Image: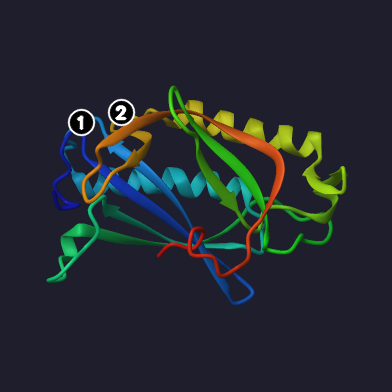
Amino acid sequence: MPIDAVQTGEVFTVRTYKQHAGFGWANTYEVQSTTEPVNSVTAIESMASAFVALEQLIHLTPVTIDRVVVSTYVPDGQPYNPSSFTTIPVSLPGQRAPSGDFLPLELCLFVRRNGAVGRDGRLLYRGCLLEADMGTDAFRGRVQPSVRNSFQTTFNTWFTTTFPQAQWNIVLARGAPNPTNVRQVISFQVSEKIAVKKLKNRYFDRP
């Protein structure tokens, strides 16, 4: 269905685009509508703002959250259908003030999206970590326990106060072209692991 006529149970893709020092990247979430809103566009904009609020909290201040693109689960095809997605300009900085040097953008905060059953979903956030946030264990980088706990508190507070909204659940959706398996996300879990992903990666930087 078009983005301006949301129906109950419909799944949408939410992509938040970030920029820093000439590099751009995105993170992807899926949400499912729980009701038919009075105003679909307003409901989508409010939901997108919730993800922006989270990402501002975890990203360092030099990182800019540029825009959010919300689209129907089924990708836009031919002919072009403008009702299949909306682009919401943001242009807001992260709110995590740096107290030292950045870790390279290739070193990512690793967060799991947990469902009640099945495999977890994974989010890799660039531009969140400082050199002081990293320790080592068996010659591998790890997020310091106090830093991990701080990030975990941020996710817990955001998730429990924001979702489920009156309109949306965060979900893990699979299937093509339509979702055939949709599982509600019940928690976000920050890993101690620092994930390494190059800047040009087809899995991580999906359009």
Residue at image coords 30%, 28%: 166
> Quick one: which residue is furthest to the top in this view?
116
Q: Badge 2 is on which residue? A: 166
Q: Residues within 10 Å of mark 2 (few under 14, many from 20)?
A: few
Which element carries disc 1, helix, strand or loop?
A: loop
Q: Which label is found at residue 10?
A: none
Can you give x and y, in whole percent of width and height, for residue 55 in the image?
A: 55, 49
Which quadrant of the view contains residue 40? top left
Residue 36 vs residue 173, the one in the foreground = 173
Question: Going from the N terminus, do you reach mark 2 or mark 1 first?
Answer: 1
Which quadrant of the view contains residue 39? top left
Compared to residue 187, the image places residue 175 above or below, namely below
Which element carries disc 2, helix, strand or loop?
A: loop
- Residue type beneath disc 1: Thr
Can you give x and y, in whole percent of width and height, for residue 75 in the image?
A: 25, 59
Residue at image coords 51%, 58%: 204
- Residue type beneath disc 2: Ala
- In the rendered image, which quarter contains the C terminus? bottom left
Can you give x and y, in whole percent of width and height, for residue 202 in the image?
A: 48, 64
Q: Residues within 10 Å of mark 1 (few under 14, many from 20)?
A: some
Inter-mark Cα distance, 2 to 1: 8 Å
